[in-house]
């Protein structure tokens, strides 16, 4: 960051080349910011309520508005005598987190997350076939015994049909399931014959039950991964706060972000917290509590960053539609 002689931030430099420029009024109050991606934010502080309005624009088009209230505020302030606000709210209570062009605060909208009609079973099958994915063929289901050893009992499943059913049943966008599946196991890009059905990539295909604290063997099995993984995504959405956004994570329910560690690489600090703008993003961080996989640095990958990059790589500007 670059500061002026009064301690005000003039510029903020990100690892992806994005540069944020801040503007101030004659009294030194921050009023707006612009970035390298044609984004702009307008800050309006209401001293009567001690609340801050942040209006966001992209390519001159209005995107959203956030209203933040100082969390220390207990009663309305008496401004009749023009008494200075003792603890004015500042824009940096909320932090915009952009990693290599990916907005980590809004991974997906609530509407897109719960739209289960974006792809039919046949469309998903064609999607697999066009990529010559191992999932275009019938999948042999391997479960885990009490010792964690995979075994086959004759059960098989059609991946496209299972994903379509899970999406419809749980009202989750099938593209969310596909992106999660690829993020966790890379099975969609795997060619037929390149991965054994008895491998971990299949029996923990969506990372369901494979947590940072250990594995739950009862959730092993490709069928469980699709049905249970999708149901968990929806449960996390349903259990998320219905209001009060943006919310800073961790918040107690989400107990840590990036293993609770801030890591600096190449002069950039990847922090152990992140603000989220909606329920869908909250649920995705509860499912995968990482912005990136910091163990891969200086390479940027993994975490919810990878989830978004996979989706935009496949579907471009109409990512979740």
Image (tube, rainbow, N blue to C red):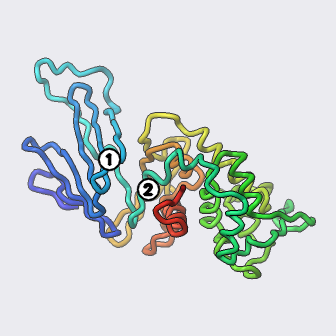
Q: Which residue is mark 2?
A: 104
User: Can you tell which mark lies on residue 248?
Assistant: none
Q: State whether residue 92 is above or below residue 223.
A: above
Going from N to C along the chain, the mark reached first, 2 or 1, is: 1
Direction from residue 12 to residue 200 in the image, left or right = right
Q: Nearer the viewer, residue 254 or 22?
A: 22
Determine the secondary structure under disc 1.
Answer: strand
Residue 293 seen in the current view: no
| Residue 266 sits above or below residue 29 on the image | below
**Image position of 199 (left or right of 2):** right
Q: Quadrant of residue 18?
A: bottom left
In the rendered structure, find residue 62 and report the number of the disc placed on it. Answer: 1
Of residue 166 and residue 119, the one placed in the foreground of this image is 119
Q: Quadrant of residue 70?
A: top left
Q: Which dot, 2 or 1, sits closer to the camera? A: 1
Camera sees residue 272: yes
Which residue extends farthest right? 154
Residue 79 against residue 105 in the figure, above or below: above
- Work out which residue is located at the far bottom of the displayed protein and give it: 193
> What's the residue at 23%, 52% (across, down)?
33
């Amino acid at each position: 960051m670059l500061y002026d002689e009064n301690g005000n931030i003039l510029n903020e430099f990100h690892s992806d080349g994005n540069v944020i420029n801040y503007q101030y009024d004659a009294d030194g109050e921050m009023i707006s910011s612009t970035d390298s991606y044609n984004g702009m934010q307008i800050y309006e502080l209401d001293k009567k309520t001690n609340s801050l309005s942040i209006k966001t624009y992209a390519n001159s088009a209005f995107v959203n508005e956030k209203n933040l209230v100082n969390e220390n505020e207990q009663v309305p302030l008496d401004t009749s005598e023009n008494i200075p606000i003792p603890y004015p709210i500042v824009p940096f209570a909320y932090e915009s987190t952009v990693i290599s062009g990916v907005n980590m605060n809004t991974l997906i909208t609530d509407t897109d997350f719960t739209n289960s009609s974006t792809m039919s079973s046949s469309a998903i099958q064609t999607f697999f076939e066009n990529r010559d994915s191992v999932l275009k063929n019938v999948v042999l289901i391997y479960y885990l015994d009490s010792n964690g050893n995979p075994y086959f009992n004759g059960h098989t499943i059609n991946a496209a049909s299972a994903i379509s059913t899970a999406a419809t049943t749980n009202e989750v966008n099938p593209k969310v399931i596909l992106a999660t599946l690829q993020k966790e196991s890379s099975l969609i890009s795997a060619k037929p014959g390149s991965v054994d059905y008895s491998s971990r990539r299949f029996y923990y295909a969506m990372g369901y039950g494979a947590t940072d604290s250990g594995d739950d063997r009862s959730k092993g099995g490709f069928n469980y991964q699709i049905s249970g993984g999708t149901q968990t995504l929806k449960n996390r959405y349903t259990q998320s706060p219905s209001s009060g956004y943006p919310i800073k994570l961790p918040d107690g329910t989400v107990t840590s972000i990036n293993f609770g560690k801030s890591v600096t690489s190449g002069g950039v600090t990847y922090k152990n917290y992140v603000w989220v703008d909606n329920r869908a993003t909250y649920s995705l961080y509860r499912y995968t509590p990482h912005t990136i996989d910091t163990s891969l640095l200086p390479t940027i990958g993994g975490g919810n960053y990878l989830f978004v990059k996979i989706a935009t790589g496949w579907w471009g500007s109409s990512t979740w539609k």
